Amino acid sequence: MSTLGRTVSGKVVGGFAALIVVAALLPLVSQSTTREITLVADDMAFYLEGDPSRPNPTIEVKAGERIRVVLRNEERGLIHDFALPAAGAGIDALGWNERGDVTFEVPDVPGNYEYVCRPHLLMMKGVMTVVAR
């Protein structure tokens, strides 16, 4: 192959093309995995999926962790949503038997951050505890 009057071997061209492909795929490979947390809204409280015994649970996450919160509204006749103001994350209001989700990065600073159902924030609120990595 000839480029700018110089002969370039097929191996060099192939190596350069492979380098471009690897560089393009690197961000996809290096992304951290997303942990999923499913909350169920029922009886004017949040519950972790599979644990109806602890209303508005404390959820422990790692600083900078990427999480996906899924909210299922199982309370007939009421709308519920989810918001974690410290992360600027939220799920719009859901009617009975609807589900929504939001994916976000946890704040980098360890501490306790409140999550709420905005229409019922006096009763439906819990704490997301951020621990150091």
Image (tube, helix red, strand yellow):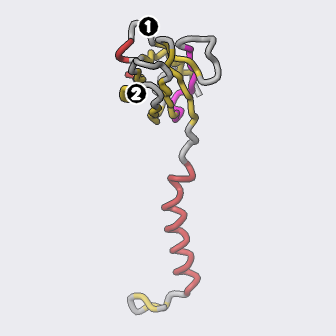
Is the C terminus in the top left, top right, bottom left or bottom right quadrant?
A: top right
> 4 left or right of 33?
left
Q: Which disc is residue 94 wearing?
A: 2
| Label pair 2/1, CB-CB below 8 angstroms | no
Q: Residues within 10 Å of mark 2 (few under 14, many from 20)?
A: some
Residue furthest front as drawn: 77
Residue 69 in view, yes or no: yes
> Considering the numbered disc 1 on the image, is that residue within a helix, a strand or a loop?
loop
Q: Position of residue 106 (x, y in %)?
A: 48, 29
- The residue beneath circle 1 is 123
Q: Is residue 104 visible?
A: no
| Residue sitting nearer the eye, 66 or 100 | 100
In front here: 63 or 56? 56
Where is residue 55? Give x, y as percent: 55, 11
Left/right of residue 60 with respect to residue 78 in the rendered view: right
Q: Which residues, given as a range, are shown in magenta?
A: 57-67
Task: Tell me residue 129's x, y (percent).
Answer: 54, 18
The quarter holding residue 115 reads top left
For badge 1, the amino acid type reads Met
Q: Nearer the viewer, residue 109 or 120?
A: 120
Instruction: Work out whether 15 lies above or below 84.
Output: below
Q: How many marks?
A: 2
